[in-house]
Image (tube, rainbow, N blue to C red):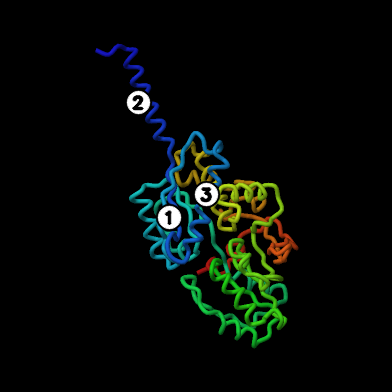
Amino acid sequence: MLSNKMIAAVAGLALAAGAAQAQEVKVGVVLPYTGIGAEFAQLADRGMELYLKLNAEAVKPYTIKIIKRDAKNPGGADAKIATQELLTQDKVDALAGWIYSPNAIASAPIVAAGKKLAVIMNAGSLAAFQRGFEINGGKVIDAIPMGGAGAVPDFTPFFQRVKDQKPDVFFVFVPAGDHAAAIVKTYGALGMRAAGIKLIGPGDITQDTKLQAMGEAAVGLITVHHYHADLDNPENKRFVAAWKQQFGADSTPDFMSVGAYDGMAAIVHAIQATKGKMDGAAAVKSLEGWKFNSPRGPIVVDPATRDIIMNEYLSEVVMVNGRLHQKVIGQIDQVKDVCKAEKIGPCAPK
């Protein structure tokens, strides 16, 4: 027969094991691990990994298990299936990822039905540029669809059409990566800068991971974006230095890396706020008004829309000692999500 002392010890071990098991939080991640977006998925993975490494104390006493599912392509259908599998098969406590907006849109009904916290780490709205440009006196003389995000087209005929119309400014909206490299290459090959046509766009077209390979053709490009690796603030310097130490001196983070870094910070906050229970409604509620000192600058989650409020940086590509850099020439503080604020693009009333 076990003594009372022995029984107490066994019971204590059982309780300890149960507590340890309860501390694990499963986070399902939907990213394009194969196909054209595989490089983006790696950047996002590394961003999440680096946050957890640099902020290990913020996670305790919980442990985070990341379960990855492949969104495969920007079409939406595969991302929707991946999201459903994470919720129904893997029983995740929270969801994150979604590089391409169509994937996030397709997954939204599944996320809503699953009633779990979901953190979208990357998205954009083309309609916001046209609205802002025209309100401030600009005139859009042509809009040229150049294909989807699934493959990089030959941009030459589209850019030649632009050159023939002789605009002052040429705005390009593409999903970064190889698209961005092809954009700048074509712009240079057609001599559009010499023709007096200024190339502008979001920071996707000057993605940090592609910038050095663009060469002289990128000099003078103007972008507005929430992040690039040259931002001069203490948190970004710490972030970039840690990234290079972790992933190699020649590697660099980009806006997708920071989106994932900040997204993991948001998830960790929700875990602590809900004491690891991660009830969907409570987790979402805990992030309303949440503030974080990000490498991109100070951010806050808008309580009304649950979107991020952040600084936007006007930057120009310059050459310094043989290397391309993005020089901040203007800044707009604490910008709200224009899509929802202005009810345009996918946010327009149906």
Say which amino acid is labelled 1: Val
Q: Is residue 206 left or right of residue 112?
A: right
Q: Which residue is mark 2?
A: 14
Q: Secondary structure at mark 2?
A: helix
**Residue 50 image offset from top left, x and y in percent:** 55, 47
- Mark sitting on residue 195: none
Front tag of 3 and 1: 3
Height in image: 179 above or below 34? below
* Image mark for residue 48: 3
Q: Residue at x 54, y 59 (%)?
A: 122
Residues under numbered marks 1 and 2 in contact, where contact means CB atoms less than 8 Å apart: no
Q: CA distance from mark 3 to mark 1?
A: 21 Å
Residue sticking out furthest to the left: 1
- Of residues 102 and 46, which is closer to you in this image? 46
| Label 1, residues with CA under 10 Å away: few <14, some 14-19, many ≥20 | some
Give SS at disc 3.
Answer: helix
Q: Amino acid at mark 2?
A: Ala
* Residue picked out by circle 1: 111
**Horizontal side of residue 252 vs 197, given as left or right:** left
What is the CA distance from the residue labelled 3 to the residue labelled 2?
33 Å
Q: Residue 213: x, y in percent?
A: 61, 67
SS class, disc 1: helix
Circle nearer the viewer, 3 or 2 = 3
Q: Amino acid at mark 3?
A: Met
Mark 2 or mark 1, which is nearer the start of the sequence?
2
